[in-house]
Image (tube, rainbow, N blue to C red):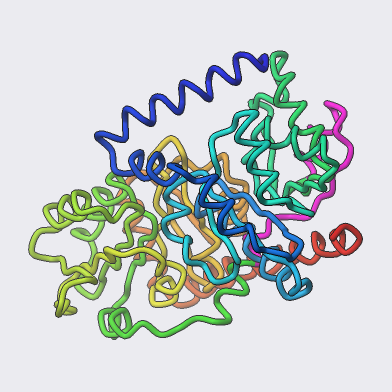
Amino acid sequence: MSIALYRLLISMYGAILYIASFFKPKAKLFISGRKGLLQRMRQLLAQEQRPRIWMHCASLGEFEQGRPVLEKLRQQYPHYAFVITFFSPSGYEVRKNYDGADYVFYMPLDSPSNARDFIDIVQPRLCIFVKYELWYYYLSQLATRNIHIILISAIFRKDQLFFSWYGHLPRRMLQCISHIFVQNAESEKMLQEIGITNVSISGDTRFDRVIEAVSHKEDLPIAQLFCKKYKVIVAGSTWAEDEVFLHKALQLLPGDWKLLLVPHEVHAAHIRDIEKLFANDITCWSDNQPDLNKRVLVVDRVGLLLQLYKYGRIAWVGGGFGKEGVHNVLEAAVYGMPCAYGPVWHQFIEAQQLIDAKGAITTSHPEVFVKQLLQWDDEETYTHAAHAAKAYVIQNGGATDLILQYLQGQV
């Protein structure tokens, strides 16, 4: 890939999103959130005298991945100002008021002028990119100015552009980064094979995030009352295919089973589709007086999933029927919950490892799922799976501390 082609693709992407913004709410947020952005940033940061640390995240999942590092840095360096940027509205709109940072913005689309102006305004001493969100002009500007850049919780696969014969430009992006923290030895080996040696195996900071989060869990009375005296499937980050699957499964389960459904998208049209699917069995979290005697409670608001998993007996983790694959399995497993998910999970090493640890199953058949739930009715069988799930998470913590040790000499 050449620089000219890269720039053309970015321009085309921006144009497509502009057209889509007339029809799709998410695209509209993407465009409207960037109008006058650099000027607003310039005004907000004009009087900021503190040195700054900048973290960039693609979306909400990457933010949660970077959050343990951010929060520990904030504790260790309270005299710094912290800036977070997001590429996607699904991250920014949820975390724009996050009190763990001083400033939260969208990232302007990658271009020579945007990158130059953005870095002139933010003036970061340290930049942290999370997992895979890399942009050529931003990285080039940072490297040219000798600003320290780290990439955390990265994981690489052979089919990525970095390792292709036409991946010259993506490899140049990696060469701009001061240090790369990867999740596994395979990623380290692949990078070394293309000449990238400034690499450490740290593991995945998401383990630290979920371990920390459950120590500060709050009670949610609606969930408590809904789940009391029932066996509950907590289905997190579900898509339409997951919901059809779960509807079929629930019909096959005894009446002492309930479903706490937390969809990935909570816009009105999707909630209406869910209500139509489950018909008279459903009540909504946001109702003035949710009918907690119903068999299905749909959580039509964001930001509660990690707290809700604790109320279930079994977790169904959504996304496993779509091309992007299953969502975060660690948020459920940390509670000692056996997990299940659809067949698209192979690109996520933790989903594979949780199955290998006997803390999860995968299936595309409601009958198989129900059969496994009934087997988990046996307490010994259930306890074994629950302990395996939690032990897997606990044993893989510690990535954040390894990254912080490295940064002690850089901040």
Q: Quadrant of residue 357?
A: bottom right
Viewer can see residue 392: no
Q: Going 81% across and 32% down the picture, which residue do you hit? A: 175
In this rendering, position of residue 321 left or right of residue 115:
left
Q: Position of residue 349 (x, y in %)?
A: 62, 47
In this rendering, position of residue 353 left or right of residue 265:
right
User: What residue span does the magenta drawing correspond to?
Assistant: 185-208
Give the residue furthest to the left. 280
Q: Position of residue 397 (x, y in %)?
A: 71, 66
Q: Quadrant of residue 46?
A: bottom right
Q: Is residue 205 magenta?
A: yes
Frontmost residue, 142 versus 56 = 142
Q: Position of residue 1 (x, y in %)?
A: 66, 15
- The quadrant the C terminus occupies is bottom right
Q: Going 32% across and 52% down the picture, which residue do you hit? A: 265
In this rendering, position of residue 267 left or right of residue 37:
left
Give the residue furthest to the right. 409
Q: Position of residue 12 (x, y in %)?
A: 46, 21
Task: Say if 127 sits above or below 168 in the image.
Answer: below
Q: Is residue 133 magenta?
A: no
Q: Going 51% across and 48% down the picture, which residue do you hit? A: 106
Task: Say if 72 sits above or below 168 in the image.
Answer: below
- Numbered disc total: 0
Task: Say if 304 sits above or below 54 in the image.
Answer: below
In this rendering, position of residue 242 left or right of residue 151:
left
Viewer can see residue 10: yes
Q: Going 76% across and 40% down the picture, which residue do you hit? A: 142
